[in-house]
């Protein structure tokens, strides 16, 4: 896999930064809504609903863009898109759903913002970049901050919430995989095709997994307001912003786009405080600050290429 930083991005659109900021703001504001939806529908119910509707949205977009003649891809790209869909969309969204369900909106946003650290580790694992001392220090600081951030739950033996936080870190790793792996595919095939084909690849496995438990959800008890929120979360957050995020990465490059994720936790924290009254102690805020500082150090430190 080529390094995202080894690929020169196309000339950046003057609107790409504004679009990226709008996406991160929308993602931050979505955390309290996502928590409410997962409480009402359970993670499997929401996953089933999302992946039942996503093929309709994807098919409509492909028909609007290409008519009945959808572009063919090589066998190599087809396998790459299948992996991207299963790991970067299916597994990432499943892990995120369970993590947010068991944790809190603010905790979810902080831990999912650790993605750039996992991006560096993924690039190192493929042997395309060496990690410099400053980057290793940043990773260590981020890990220490994450432990401090989760310490209240660990010390209280709140294994449900603590386990949710651990799952969120895995979800962040899957999102980093999606960001890195999608970049060369988007440059060859375009953001629309990559997002659509990857979504279709993930649909059937997720439906098979989530279907049995989704059938036991009391759908009649879901309020009309939550149904409206589900439509927003699936269509706008799960479809439009994912498509736009791929475009922003292609325009600006992964290295220039990833730091925007740091804005997500304060937005999510304010939204959670305003909507649910979530409280943040000094230790948690200090842990969040240390975590994001470590992530920033790892992200912005000079990188070594092999």
Image (tube, rainbow, N blue to C red):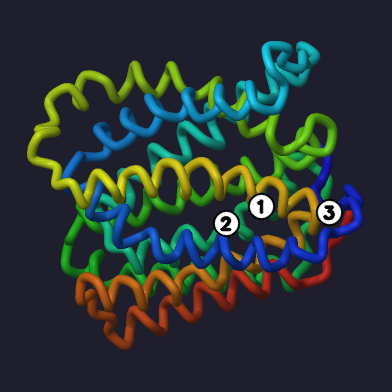
Quadrant placement of the N terminus: top right
Q: Could you say where residue 54 lies in the image, as x and y percent from the top left?
A: 46, 29
Where residue 279 sits: x, y (%)? 23, 79
Looking at the image, which residue sits at the far bottom?
282
> Considering the numbered disc 2 on the image, is that residue within a helix, a strand or a loop?
helix
Count numbered badges in the picture.
Answer: 3
Answer whether labels 1 and 2 touch (C-beta < 8 Å): yes
Where is mark 1, residue-wise? 119
- Label 2 and label 3: CA atoms lie apart by 15 Å
Residue displayed at 76% across by 60% down:
255
Residue 5 numbered mark, or none? 3
Q: Is residue 231 visible?
A: yes
Q: Give the image location of residue 199, x and y in percent.
A: 54, 28
Q: Is residue 306 visible?
A: no
Query: What is the number of the mark on residue 262?
Result: none
Pick whichever of labels 2 and 3 is earlier in the sequence: 3
């Amino acid at each position: 896999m080529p390094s995202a930083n080894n690929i020169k991005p196309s000339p950046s659109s003057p609107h790409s930064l504004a679009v990226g900021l709008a996406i991160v703001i929308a993602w931050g504001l979505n955390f309290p809504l996502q928590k409410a939806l997962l409480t009402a529908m359970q993670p499997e119910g929401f996953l089933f609903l999302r992946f039942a509707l996503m093929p309709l949205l994807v098919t409509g977009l492909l028909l609007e863009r290409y008519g009945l003649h959808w572009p063919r891809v090589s066998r190599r790209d087809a396998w790459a898109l299948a992996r991207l869909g299963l790991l970067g969309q299916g597994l990432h969204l499943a892990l995120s759903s369970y993590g947010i369900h068991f944790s809190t909106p603010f905790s979810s946003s902080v831990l999912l913002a650790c993605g750039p650290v996992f991006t560096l580790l993924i690039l190192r694992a493929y042997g395309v970049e060496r990690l410099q001392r400053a980057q290793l220090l940043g990773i260590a600081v981020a890990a220490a901050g994450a432990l401090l951030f989760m310490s209240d739950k660990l010390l209280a033996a709140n294994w449900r919430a603590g386990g949710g936080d651990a799952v969120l870190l895995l979800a962040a790793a899957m999102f980093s995989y999606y960001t890195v792996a999608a970049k060369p595919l988007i440059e060859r095939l375009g953001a629309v095709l990559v997002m659509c084909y990857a979504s279709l690849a993930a649909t059937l496995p997720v439906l098979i997994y989530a279907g049995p438990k989704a059938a036991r959800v009391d759908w009649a008890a879901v309020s009309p307001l939550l149904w409206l929120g589900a439509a927003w979360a699936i269509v706008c957050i799960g479809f439009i912003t994912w498509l736009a995020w791929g475009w922003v990465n292609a325009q600006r490059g992964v290295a220039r786009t990833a730091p925007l994720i740091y804005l997500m936790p304060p937005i999510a924290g304010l939204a959670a405080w305003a909507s649910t009254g979530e409280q943040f102690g000094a230790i948690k805020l200090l842990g969040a600050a240390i975590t994001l500082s470590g992530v920033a150090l790892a992200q912005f430190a000079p990188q070594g290429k092999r």
